[in-house]
Image (cartoon, rainbow, N blue to C red):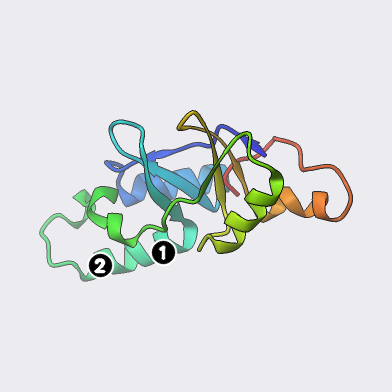
């Protein structure tokens, strides 16, 4: 499991999101509201679609459109509690549209699992070290 994943605010612009993706090399980032509630998941591919969609919006200030404007385009969040068995994570991951599972502890985000995290475990090795997040 990757430790506390980075998040992005609903008030972030697409350019801000692009910068986070470019600098972090993440492929999925949870989007949070003002109360730090996760409202969806922004993937790199969804970001591409949002830039294309924004180009078609009839607005004088297209660059001012933030993620709040695009909430309906985000992937739903898939979560498990930290103390749930790994088999629960596999099931949730297989049903998640972005194949990411965000781990919570008492309702707060505490980690992230991606297929890269579980493949070594399934292959009989140790789970991947917690050195990267959200990919």
Q: How many marks?
A: 2
Q: Position of residue 122 (x, y in %)?
A: 81, 54
Q: Which residue is mark 1?
A: 48
The residue depicted at 19 percent of the width and 57 percent of the height is 62
- Sequence-wise, the earlier of marks 1 and 2 is 1
User: Of all residues shown, which one is farthest toward the bottom?
Assistant: 56
User: Could you say where residue 31 lies in the image, as x and y percent from the top left?
Assistant: 39, 44
Q: Would you say 116 lies left or right of 35 here? A: right
CB within 8 Å, label 1 to label 2: no
Which quadrant does the N terminus fall into?
Answer: top right
Q: Residue at x 76, y 42 (%)?
A: 128
Q: Is residue 39 visible?
A: yes
Q: Secondary structure at mark 1?
A: helix
Looking at the image, can residue 66 be seen? no
Number of residues whose C-alpha sits closer than 10 Å to that of mark 1, classed few (under 14), some (14–19) or many (20 or more): few
Across and down, in percent, residue 12 comes to 31, 42
Q: Marks 1/2: CA distance?
A: 11 Å
In this view, the residue in front, 104 or 126, is 104
Q: In the rendered image of this protein, does residue 115 appear above or below residue 79?
A: below
Residue matched to label 2: 55
Left or right of residue 121, residue 73 in this image: left
Q: Callout 2: 10 Å neighbours few (<14), some, many (20+)?
A: few
* Residue 75 quadrant: bottom left
Kindly give the residue lying farthest to the right in the view shown: 124
At 44% from the left edge and 45% from the top edge, which residue is drawn? 30
Q: Quadrant of residue 34?
A: top left
- Residue 134, percent across and down? 57, 45
Name which residue lies at 33% across and 51% down: 14
Label 2 SS = helix
Viewer-proximal residue, 49 or 60? 49
Q: Is residue 36 above or below residue 112?
A: above
Along the line of sight, the residue nearer the viewer: 35 or 56: 35
């Amino acid at each position: 499991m990757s430790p506390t994943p980075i998040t992005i605010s609903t008030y972030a612009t697409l350019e801000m999101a692009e910068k986070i993706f470019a600098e972090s090399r993440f492929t999925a980032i949870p989007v949070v509201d003002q109360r730090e509630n996760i409202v969806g998941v922004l993937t790199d591919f969804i970001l591409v679609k949002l830039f294309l969609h924004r180009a078609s919006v009839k607005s004088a200030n297209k660059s001012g459109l933030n993620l709040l404007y695009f909430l309906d385009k985000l992937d739903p969040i898939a979560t498990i509690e930290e103390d749930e068995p790994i088999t629960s994570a596999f099931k949730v991951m297989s049903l998640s549209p972005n194949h990411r599972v965000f781990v919570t502890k008492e309702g707060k985000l505490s980690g992230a699992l991606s297929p890269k995290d579980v493949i070594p475990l399934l292959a009989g090795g140790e789970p991947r070290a917690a050195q990267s997040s959200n990919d």
